[in-house]
Image (cartoon, rainbow, N blue to C red):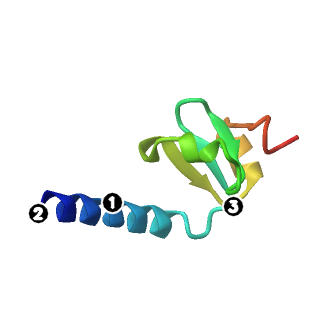
Amino acid sequence: MKKQVKTLVIAIAIILFLATTAFANVFGNKQTRVYHEPTCKVLVRVKLDNKVSFPTAEAAVKAGYKPCKRCHK
């Protein structure tokens, strides 16, 4: 039973994340104030609570975020 609940919670979290980021082109980390491309390997280490989505890189910069040194060379 616990495994089913855990699986359901994870599935709901993924659905909510996808729903809120469906139109995002870049993702920011609230803690580091760095934004990443969706394919950036660093992005997978960012906790879901710290992720914020932006429609464009320009919007991220206007919000005070810097580009990731790995995916924005």
Residue pointed to by mark 1: 10
The residue carrying pointer 3 sits among few (fewer than 14), some (14 to 19) or many (20 or more) residues within 10 Å by Cα, namely some
23 vs 13, left or right, is right
| Mark nearer the N terminus (3 vs 1) | 1
Quadrant of the drawing holding the N terminus: bottom left
Q: Amino acid at mark 1?
A: Ile
Q: Residue furthest top?
A: 32
- Which is more toward the observer, 4 or 36? 4
Q: Position of residue 58 (x, y in %)?
A: 77, 50
- Which is more toward the observer, 18 or 55? 18
Q: Position of residue 8 (x, y in %)?
A: 26, 66
Q: Amino acid at mark 3?
A: Asn
| Mark nearer the N terminus (1 vs 2) | 2
Residue pointed to by mark 2: 1
Residue pointed to by mark 3: 25
SS class, disc 3:
loop
Nearer the camera: disc 1 or disc 2: 2
Q: Look at 41% across and 63% down and name the residue there.
A: 14
Q: Quadrant of residue 26?
A: bottom right
SS class, disc 1:
helix
The residue carrying pointer 2 sits among few (fewer than 14), some (14 to 19) or many (20 or more) residues within 10 Å by Cα, namely few
Nearer the camera: disc 2 or disc 3: 2
Q: Position of residue 46 (x, y in %)?
A: 53, 41
Q: Look at 65% across and 41% down and name the residue there.
A: 42
- Which is more toward the observer, 46 or 59? 46
Number of numbered discs: 3
